[in-house]
Image: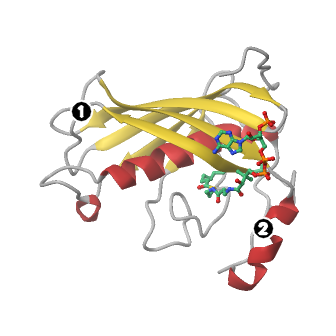
Amino acid sequence: MPDDLTLPPRPDFFPAPGGALPQHWSKCFGCGDDQPAGMAMTFTAGEGLEVSGRLTVAQRYQGGPGVIHGGILSVAFDEVQGMACMVLGGPVVTGHLEIDFARPIPLGSVLEFRARIDGMVRRKVYTSAEARIVEGPTAGDTVVATSRGLFLTIKPEHFAPMADFVDGVPVSPFGTSSL
Ligand SMILES: CCCCCCCCCCCCCC(=O)SCCNC(=O)CCNC(=O)[C@H](O)C(C)(C)COP(=O)(O)OP(=O)(O)OC[C@H]1O[C@@H](n2cnc3c(N)ncnc32)[C@H](O)[C@@H]1OP(=O)(O)O
């Protein structure tokens, strides 16, 4: 990470710690409630710049026998770190995402993710996150996976070339941007 990072303020529009975060897009595969094939993750504001997310590891997320697929875990980390960027009040996209898979995660587990912005420079937003199993046979305080992300703030026009392919009507979660 660069040395000259700054941290954004926590804005007034952001929910108080423990408050639910709105979906960023109802059709999102990770969190949308209008996406039947999706992962239906839910998110809560934490202290400071932290957010937490929950994922129930459904049978259909199986990769190796009995365990979560690594790609599904990657989606969850992408999503929770993207949601941590919600404090910025405008859209971001993932530029880089890395995951360390530390422990097997059995199907049926409930995972809790915690993520935060570690710093920003220009349009680059550096994030990190970790996951623990909070329900299931191997639940405990052990960190089962960690991630680092780089998100880029974008102008709403970023998605304009995709207008012909959108399934649904995007809206701004806090009314702070056109996405
Ligand atoms: C309230 C509002 C709600 C919002 C809610 C959001 C929730 C979201 C939750 C959703 C979760 C799901 C989210 C998803 O899944 S988002 C879907 C997956 N991601 C994408 O589709 C993004 C595709 N990529 C692009 O569009 C462009 O490449 C982007 C926009 C990322 C950059 O192209 P752009 O032309 O704009 O920028 P630039 O090239 O001038 O680069 C600018 C700076 O960035 C640095 N750089 C760039 N790439 C990388 C890299 N890979 N590693 C390291 N550094 C990188 C670069 O060196 C430069 O640095 P510097 O010169 O300044 O030092």
Residue 70 coordinates in the image, percent (x, y): 32, 49
Quadrant placement of the N terminus:
top right
Give the residue drawn at x 30%, y 34%: 133
Residue farthest left in this picture: 65
The three-letter code of the residue at mark 2 reads: Phe
Determine the residue positioned at 58% across, 64% down.
28
Mark 1 and 2 residues: CB-CB less than 8 Å, in contact? no
12 or 116, nearer to the observer: 116
Residue 159 - label: 2
Specify whether tag 1 is near ligand 1 (CB below 8 Å): no
Along the horizontal axis of the image, is 110 left or right of 167? left
* Residue 173 marker: none
Q: Is 159 rendered above or below residue 9?
A: below
Of residues 112 and 102, the one drawn nearer to the viewer in this rendering:
102
Visible in this render: residue 14?
Answer: no
Where residue 35 appears, as percent x and y from the top left, is 52, 72
Residue at 45% from the left image edge and 66% from the top image edge: 38
Residue with the most extreme top position? 3
**In the displayed structure image, the side of residue 101 where residue 171 appears, left or right:** right
On screen, 173 above or below 27?
Answer: above
Q: Amino acid at mark 1?
A: Arg
Residue extending furthest bottom?
164
Sequence-first tag of 1 and 2: 1
Secondary structure found at label 1: loop
Splitting the image into 4 quarters, where does residue 21 fall? top right
Q: Which mark is on residue 103?
A: 1
- Measured Cα–Cα span from mark 1 to mark 2: 37 Å
Q: Quadrant of the C terminus?
A: bottom right
Q: Nearer the viewer, residue 16 or 93?
A: 93
Residue shown at 43%/60% (left/top)?
Answer: 39
Location of residue 156 in the rendering, given as x and y in whole percent from the top left corner: 85, 60
Q: Residues within 10 Å of mark 1 (few under 14, many from 20)?
A: few
